[in-house]
Image (spheres, grey):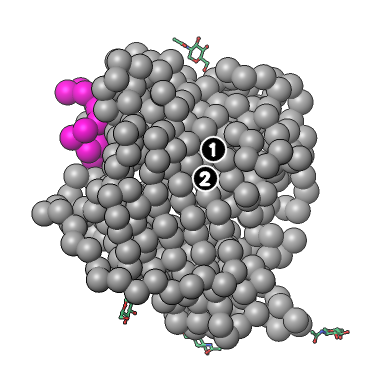
Amino acid sequence: MRCSAAALSVLAAATSVVAQPPSPGKDGRYTISSSEITAQFIPYGATLTNLFVKDKNGEDVDVVLGYDDSNYYPKDPGHPVYNSIPGRYVNRIGKGKYTIDNTTYTTELNDGTNTLHSGANNWSYRVWNVTDSTEDSITFAIRDASNSSLGMLGLVKGQVTYSVEGSTWRIKMEATSPEARTHNGEALMLTHHTYFNLDAFKNPDTVKIWNHTLHMPYSKRYLIADDGALPTGQIGTAAPNSINDFASSAGLFLGHAQSDPKFSGNCGGGGACEGYNGYFLIDDAPADAVVVSLASSFSGITADLRTDQHGVVLYSCNWMDGTADLKKTQGTKENRKVVRSSCVAIEAQDYVDGINQ
Ligand SMILES: *[C@@H]1O[C@H](CO)[C@@H](O)[C@H](O)[C@H]1NC(C)=O
Ligand SMILES: *[C@@H]1O[C@H](CO)[C@@H](O)[C@H](O)[C@H]1NC(C)=O
Ligand SMILES: *[C@@H]1O[C@H](CO)[C@@H](O)[C@H](O)[C@H]1NC(C)=O
Ligand SMILES: *[C@@H]1O[C@H](CO)[C@@H](O)[C@H](O)[C@H]1NC(C)=O
Ligand SMILES: *[C@@H]1O[C@H](CO)[C@@H](O)[C@H](O)[C@H]1NC(C)=O
């Protein structure tokens, strides 16, 4: 079975939609569905809480991370940006500074010496408005006042529409800035921060993500990053079967380079971050090509990504420390927690820290 996701970001000229806000279910979730997919959302962060797709036996499997209690999302001290829309500028801004037209803006340092996901008041911590919904689609909107995230000036109006059709899940993000220079994408960059485990943590052999396969046929190149996961401005090219190679052949395990001594520090953290937390470029992909294909033979589920963005961030959940609970739709009697390296976030977006490079 195939489940597809496409992210479209920062399209101009959104028209406003006026509709009576629809009502959620008792647990605060809005449900949309197609013949193959059932997806549930909450307004907090415009978050996807559950994504049910069919496994090889035709059973529904909830393939994304989340919590059973909708009210826990705002309380979670770890706040891993579960399947929400961080913004208005995702991922890192190096040293908390960027310059537009000779004016330098200072942003909040909340990730070592860098800004991550815009700092305080970022979009993944906000309760969005539901402006439209049907059986198979839902639209959330956010009005982000100037400087509500430090150093991000000008009003921005954002909206996301999620829809499902057959085995396809679409994500359409739009944002406009009526006041500031941000409308050309200068301090405006969005993504959907989706965390997957295509086995729903039910594989008795392993809950780790390393035995999912990953193919990114157009992504030989990646951004070289420093120890704080900040790109240096250099671009690397992965040799076949080297640690950052997911391009040369289909069927490479996410953990194919586990025995490489560099694997344990491949995503920084002073050598403490194993696996991946970096950006892969998408080069010369034909329009509508599958650019990322994540699959698990245990469940028989494949997630194919199509996107109009320039690349993807891949984060293999190194910092999950085993304290967060799994949903009741996931795991086994023994596996009830999100342990280290047991999931992968796949985030289609523009170049990380592109604003400074
Ligand atoms: C920025 O500064 C440079 C050098 O002083 C100048 O040539 C340029 O016109 C300035 N740009 C703007 C948009 O002010
Ligand atoms: C997002 O904003 C919240 C609320 O202000 C803040 O506590 C948190 O540190 C921010 N998170 C990130 C990742 O920037
Ligand atoms: C939701 O809509 C209300 C009424 O228009 C507005 O005051 C509020 O700022 C909106 N919330 C967000 C997150 O945009
Ligand atoms: C943005 O907010 C900070 C305080 O949070 C303030 O010091 C700064 O002057 C504000 N910037 C602008 C341009 O309003
Ligand atoms: C799991 O992945 C490793 C590489 O990380 C590989 O060596 C092993 O054969 C895989 N096991 C199965 C059952 O696919």
Asked whether residue 256 is drawn in magenta, I would say no
Q: Which residue occupies 32% across, 26% down?
A: 54
Q: As shown in the figure, which amino acid type bears the numbered disc 1?
A: Leu
Residue 42 position, x and y percent, is 27, 56
The answer to whether any part of residue 115 appears in the image is: no
- Drawn side of residue 277 relative to residue 141, left or right: right
Quarter occupied by the C terminus: bottom right
Mark 1–mark 2 Cα distance, whole angstroms, equals 6 Å
Identify the element where label 1 is drawn: strand
Q: Is residue 119 above or below residue 206?
A: below
Of mark 1 and mark 2, the one earlier in the sequence is 2
Q: Which residue occupies 71% across, 22% down?
A: 248
Q: Which mark is residue 305?
A: 1
Q: Which residue occupies 58% across, 17% down?
A: 251
- Drawn side of residue 307 relative to residue 209, left or right: right
Give the magenta range.
323-334
Q: Residues within 10 Å of mark 1 (few under 14, many from 20)?
A: many
Residue 306 position, x and y percent, is 57, 40
Tag 1 near tag 2, CB within 8 Å: yes
Q: Hey, which quadrant is residue 298 in on the image?
A: top left
Q: Main secondary structure of the magenta part?
A: loop
Q: Residues within 10 Å of mark 2 (few under 14, many from 20)?
A: many
Q: Is residue 62 above or below residue 33?
A: above
Q: Which mark is residue 220?
A: none
- Drawn side of residue 219 relative to residue 93, left or right: right
Quarter occupied by the N terminus: top left
The answer to whether any part of residue 159 appears in the image is: yes
Residue at the limit of the structure toward the left, as seen here: 26
Q: As shown in the figure, which amino acid type bears the numbered disc 2?
A: Ala
Question: Which residue has dot 2 on it?
Answer: 6
Of 280 and 6, nearer the camera is 6
Q: Hey, which quadrant is residue 183 in on the image?
A: bottom right
